[in-house]
Image (cartoon, helix red, strand yellow):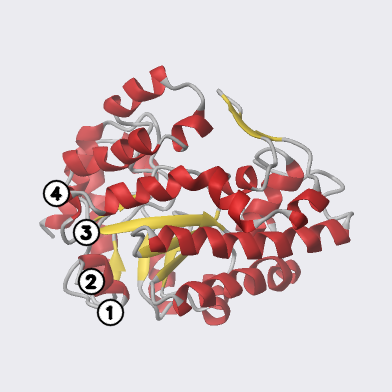
Amino acid sequence: MTPLHQVIINKNTKINPIWIMRQAGRYLPEFREIRKLNPDFIKLCLNEILSSEITLQPLKRFDLDAAVIFSDILMLPYGLNQKVEFKKGFGPILGEIDINEMTALDEIDFIEKIYPVYKAIKKVSSNNLMKNKNTIGFVGAPWTLLVYMINQQSPKKNLKQDFFKDTDLIKNILLVLEKFLKIHIKNQIENGANVIQIFDSWAGLLEEKDLPNYIYSPTLNLVNYVKSLKIPVICFPREIKNYKEFCKIVKPDAISIDYNMDPKEALKDIQIPIQGGLDPKILLTDKETLKKEAIKYLDIFKDHPYIFNLGHGILPETNPKMVECLVSIVKNY
């Protein structure tokens, strides 16, 4: 059994596996070489040779316990024929929504459009580097995808003023998302993903009263679906105010906490395996600070099933030597 499965399934507290959100990509010089020659981000995600190579790059450097597929949560709206492009220095820009077209979309056409993602997962999971390691597939949570699809760009601090105006549109998008997210998850698993993470990057934008409709209920449907396929599922409802309530209702197999969550509170409130928490900015400091902060998390969770990770994606300006240092701190703990 892999170290991640040991912790998530067997609730093992003797080991602390480590992987890093966004570990495949922007902070590695070898990734930047590929990126320079491939400026179109979507095309790069859909090049199974390059995306599988990028996925494995960090595993060639560091003793990580999992590979996370180099892809993007916005492959889902892209597969639904919404225009998606990434503008340098700005982030994603999405086109208008044609809800009738999306509702009528055939499963086969959707799969065909993003099929290289599944081929990349297959390549990664069968690679020799993956002995006793997990291949992590992922999706965006329905709420976060809804935000991008209606807002048509990253909300950063706020949503469009009339975001909630068209309730029928929202209801229909959520139905389409549930259907195609399940298809996307199933295809990732069939091609070798043996852990699924659900990223709810914009969970923190909602008020308490809106959580049941937009987060709890839609995410619970996905979590139950992944469990029905006998694969562990990790949720990351970033900056949600109440992790305890989320875990009680949604019941993922493990929960990833962001860096604003006090780890001691998490330990008190959360019974299931916990992942993450370290502020990615700590990797921009020095080795002493990094050691102190990493050990703080390891000490707090020493008697709780815990997977070491960051409280958000690794920053582009991170020095790979600091990642190497972090991995050895965790492995030697």
* Foreground label between 1 and 3: 3
Which residue is labeled 3 in the image? 133
Residue 55 seen in the figure: yes
Judge left or right: residue 168 versus residue 1: right
Which residue is labeled 4 in the image? 328
Instruction: Name the amino acid, label 4.
Output: Ser
Q: Secondary structure at mark 1?
A: loop
How far apart, in angstroms, are the residues tagged by discs 2 and 1? 12 Å
- The residue sitting at 51% across, 25% down in the picture is 40
Which residue is labeled 2 in the image? 302
Q: Earlier in the sequence, mark 2 or mark 4?
A: 2
Image quadrant where one finds the C terminus: bottom left
Q: Earlier in the sequence, mark 1 or mark 3?
A: 1
Query: How would you rate the neighbour count of disc 4 (Cα within 10 Å): few for under 14, some for 14-19, many for 20 or more?
Result: some
Quadrant hosting residue 98: top right
Q: Earlier in the sequence, mark 3 or mark 2?
A: 3
The residue nearer to you, when weighing 111 against 165, is: 111
Query: How would you rate the neighbour count of disc 1 (Cα within 10 Å): few for under 14, some for 14-19, many for 20 or more?
Result: some
